[in-house]
Amino acid sequence: MSDNPTCLNIRDGIPDWITIREAVRLLNGLNGCKIRKSDFYRFALQGKILFSIYFQSPVILRKIKSQNHKLKLRPIKSSSTMKSFTLAESSFVSENNLTFSTEGRYIHPVQRVIDTTLLGYEYVLIQRLLAHSLKIPSPVTGAKSNNYGITVCLLGETFQLFEKMTWHERIERHVKRLPKNISSDDYEDIILNATKKDSHKYYFPMHELPSDACFVLRKSELDKLINKPIEKEILQPSPTRISTPLSRLFWLACKNNETISPLIMQPYKLLSIFEQWASEEGITDRFSGDTLKAALERGSPPSIPTQK
């Protein structure tokens, strides 16, 4: 991913979209404030601003199925060897054979800038950019323990990124990333099958952004930062919206669950368990350790405080 700035002349007006680096310079020049690239990444991860992706080259999209406003997942039914070329490396190693369930035609959008609500692995890509900007270690797995692919939002629907290539091309790209437990016999079978199918091209999900794509900010999102006091409107944390009775029920459910009861006083360690359960049920929502901690603190008896 790249994030190279272009020359931005404020007197000529703000373009429809700008890079994150341009946004930093523009806001600091207009408001006299000290905002950094890391602040934008935090705002995006917190859902306070919406990022878009600038695709310099053509991309292929397919609509992701949803149910009750949740993105649906489906298992991949094929040999473990062939799964390795469809799944991301992290999912294959963890033996998670789920992927986004898509439907309809594969489309080639004419738009070069497409919004993303960070429902897919692009959330982790933003986490990496945040870590890099703060000069801290990059996330090992990130908030998404399984990489189901890159998602974008178009006309109110969520789509997944795909690429079209032959099996031989796909194998050449991924063979170096295969786990060591795949034998040489498996490689021979793969090459043989690829040779037979080499003249045909297939659609494969993308698990990373194209190398010439980058995150950008639309003018409408930038206006949110220009027109609102950043310290009061943007940096202020969102309130936790959960009632005391629900907090009590939540605490009781956790307390009487054999799996999570030992960790009830360590809510941040519980987060990964809830994320795993959500993944198994096809729920792709992001969970917050702060929200979990606040709910347990509010629902617990006064004499049993939670810990970090």
Image (cartoon, rainbow, N blue to C red):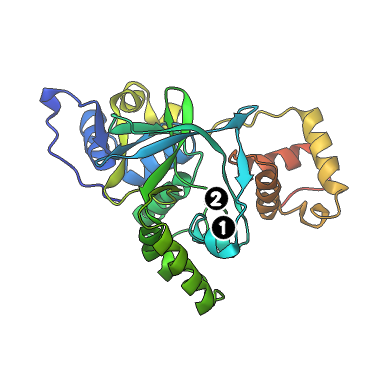
Left or right side of 304 for 6: left
Whether 148 is drawn above or below 14: the answer is below
Q: Is residue 302 visible?
A: no
Gap in angstroms between the C-alphas marked 2 and 1: 14 Å
Residue at (29, 29) in percent of width and height: 111
Residue 259 drawn at (x, y percent): 81, 55
Question: From what the image shows, is residue 78 above or below residue 232?
Answer: below
Q: Amino acid at mark 1?
A: Ser
For the residue pair 223 and 187, the one nearer the viewer reads as: 187
Residue 89 in the image, given as x and y percentages of width and height: 50, 61
Residue 23 on image: x %, y %? 26, 36
Judging depth in this view, the residue of 201 and 87 nearest the camera is 201
Q: Which residue is mark 2?
A: 143
The quarter holding residue 122 reads: top left
Q: Position of residue 281 (x, y in %)?
A: 70, 42
The first of marks 2 and 1 along the sequence is 1
Please name the residue that numbered disc 1 is placed on: 91
Residue at the spot 36% in from the left edge and 24% down from the top edge: 224
Which residue occupies the extreme right position in the image?
Answer: 256
State which quadrant residue 284 falls in: top right
Which amino acid type corresponds to the residue marked 2 in the rendered image? Ala
Quick one: SS at disc 1?
Answer: helix
Q: Is residue 83 left or right of residue 257?
A: left
At 38% from the left and 61% from the top, the residue drawn is 168
